[in-house]
């Protein structure tokens, strides 16, 4: 588990908005305990630990576990000293961060063991910042339809921010004055949200770690994806209360938590909550499928023979592959989701988790709150009945954008015209993708990295725009 909620800027924002320190401390403390019960290793960003006094105080209560490797600091350096030296160069000498890192250099901070990262969070935030500006109407997606004059000013300097920082930390406190010095609070928070999305994903992706999600006081933190299995805080807490086990967990000494992992009642409660899905079956890629070797998965897809006998095999494989390509913009696929009180089923269903880029634009402009999918394991030409079947799954509540996945589009021009006719008539946006399309997007995703928008960009230019 990766504890993203200790971010110092987010905590400071909560305190400024009236959330009490005690509420924050209590929720952080319980979140750590639940994470230790559910996960083998709990990762804490080194920057959050060293810069955030609340994080140091809460984590410090678990000093008995520091030698076990169950709690680990993670940062982009070879040691805490090197990490502190690099951070000192990014902050003003009079800042609170500089004071905190000076204590690290003087070895006055007791901390969990330190794990070095292979990638740079700063570079990932920079990449995410520039990528978001490549999407159409990106500021409308991020900030809504208001603040026209502010957005005009921000658009002029958005792409210049990475260079304008001149080596300082890519954090809201330094970005905001360069972007829009006197911006309203809501704009400042959304700018911080954009930075945090890339920052959190940088850690989660490399560590293959889920988040503690669904928090109460900390619940307004930047939305996070669920590729690696998140811990639903409120659900688990409420179920433990119902099973009369929560107080036992709260009262346990830190070193006793390991023993509680073996208590049948607690273990079964955790398993039942972590495995719970709203409807249908979640298609979550295995850890070995999360490596960027997407070519192997495309080869497996092509090897599935077309026809009714292999329909389920194709259905599940292509759903998992599309999930992998577009993560974290799209959430895990839900197979055979029931609709209309169980009278119908969707072949596949992806929650749209994007706040920017192509899927964020589709969500805000064309009602793509979810992406609906229909899978056809045959290579004959798609005609109006197949397209109409997908269009019939659309609704204002579910969304009106979907994928029609098939083995081979025999006549792309004619198929596009059929989909365009439906779109112009206001029936929704059907995007027809065959094995060749999936292979192209897999290659773009592999070459661009997990946070790349290249695959979604191809989808937009090659499949969305021709319908307009």
Image: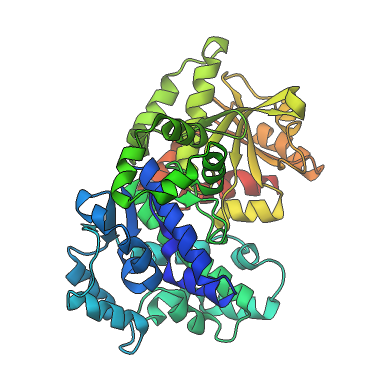
Q: Is residue 451 above or below residue 177?
A: above
The quarter of the picture where residue 340 lies is: top right
Q: Residue at x 40, y 67 (%)?
A: 126
Q: Residue at x 67, y 47 (%)?
A: 368
Please indicate, yes or no, whether residue 210 appears anywhere in the rendered image: no
Q: Residue at x 55, y 57 (%)?
A: 357
Near-viewer residue (428 or 178): 178
The extreme bottom residue here reads 94
Left/right placement of residue 376 relative to residue 251 reads right
Residue 399: x and y in percent read 71, 43
Left/right placement of residue 280 relative to residue 435 reads right
Residue 139: x and y in percent read 61, 68
The extreme top residue here reads 309
Near-viewer residue (424 or 218): 218
Q: Residue at x 45, y 39 (%)?
A: 324
Residue 65: x and y in percent read 25, 52
Please indicate, yes or no, whether residue 201 appears anywhere in the rendered image: yes
Q: Is residue 343 above or below residue 79?
A: above
Residue 218: x and y in percent read 53, 61
Q: Is residue 186 above or below residue 308?
A: below
Q: Is residue 269 above or below residue 308?
A: below
The extreme right residue here reads 425
**What scheme was used to colour the molecule?**
rainbow
Near-viewer residue (51 or 468): 51
The quarter of the picture where residue 95 lies is: bottom left
Count of all numbered marks drawn on residues in the image? 0
């Amino acid at each position: 588990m990766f504890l993203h909620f200790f971010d110092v800027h987010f905590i400071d924002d909560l305190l400024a908005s009236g959330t009490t320190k005690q509420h924050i401390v209590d929720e952080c403390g319980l979140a750590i305990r639940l994470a230790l019960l559910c996960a083998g290793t709990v990762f804490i960003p080194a920057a959050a630990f060293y810069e955030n006094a609340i994080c140091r105080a809460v984590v410090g209560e678990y000093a008995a576990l520091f030698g076990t490797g169950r709690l680990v600091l993670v940062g982009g350096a070879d040691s805490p000293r090197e990490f502190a030296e690099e951070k000192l160069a990014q902050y003003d000498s009079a800042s609170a961060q500089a004071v905190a890192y000076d204590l690290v250099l003087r070895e006055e901070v007791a901390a969990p063991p330190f794990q070095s990262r292979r990638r740079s969070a700063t570079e990932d935030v920079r990449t995410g910042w520039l990528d978001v500006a490549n999407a159409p109407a990106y500021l409308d997606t991020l900030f809504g339809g208001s603040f026209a004059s502010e957005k005009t000013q921000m658009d002029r300097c958005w792409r210049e921010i990475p260079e304008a920082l001149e080596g300082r930390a890519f954090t809201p406190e330094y970005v905001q004055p360069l972007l829009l010095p006197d911006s309203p609070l809501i704009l400042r928070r959304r700018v911080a949200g954009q930075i945090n999305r890339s920052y959190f994903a940088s850690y989660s992706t490399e560590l293959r770690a889920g988040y503690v999600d669904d928090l109460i006081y900390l619940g307004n933190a930047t939305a996070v994806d669920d590729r690696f299995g998140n811990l639903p805080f409120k659900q688990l807490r409420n179920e433990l209360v119902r099973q009369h086990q929560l107080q036992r967990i709260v009262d346990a000494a830190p070193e006793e938590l390991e023993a509680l992992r073996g208590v049948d009642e607690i273990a079964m409660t955790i398993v039942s909550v972590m495995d719970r899905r709203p409807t249908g079956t979640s298609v979550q890629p295995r850890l070995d499928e999360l490596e960027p070797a997407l070519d192997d998965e495309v080869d497996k897809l092509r090897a599935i023979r077309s026809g009714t006998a292999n329909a389920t095999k194709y259905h599940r494989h292509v759903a998992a592959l599309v999930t992998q390509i577009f993560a974290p913009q799209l959430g895990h696929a839900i197979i055979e989701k029931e609709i209309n009180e169980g009278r119908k089923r969707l072949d596949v269903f992806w929650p749209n988790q994007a706040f920017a880029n192509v899927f964020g634009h589709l969500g805000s402009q064309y009602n793509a709150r979810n992406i609906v999918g229909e899978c056809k394991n045959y290579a004959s030409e798609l005609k109006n009945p197949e397209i109409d079947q997908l269009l019939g799954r659309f609704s204002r509540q579910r969304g009106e954008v979907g994928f029609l996945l098939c083995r081979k589009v025999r006549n792309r021009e004619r198929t596009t015209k059929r989909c365009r006719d439906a779109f112009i008539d206001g029936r929704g946006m059907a995007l027809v993708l065959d094995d060749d399309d999936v292979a192209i997007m897999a290659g773009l995703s592999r070459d661009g990295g997990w946070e790349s928008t290249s695959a979604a960009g191809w989808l937009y230019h090659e499949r969305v725009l021709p319908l307009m």
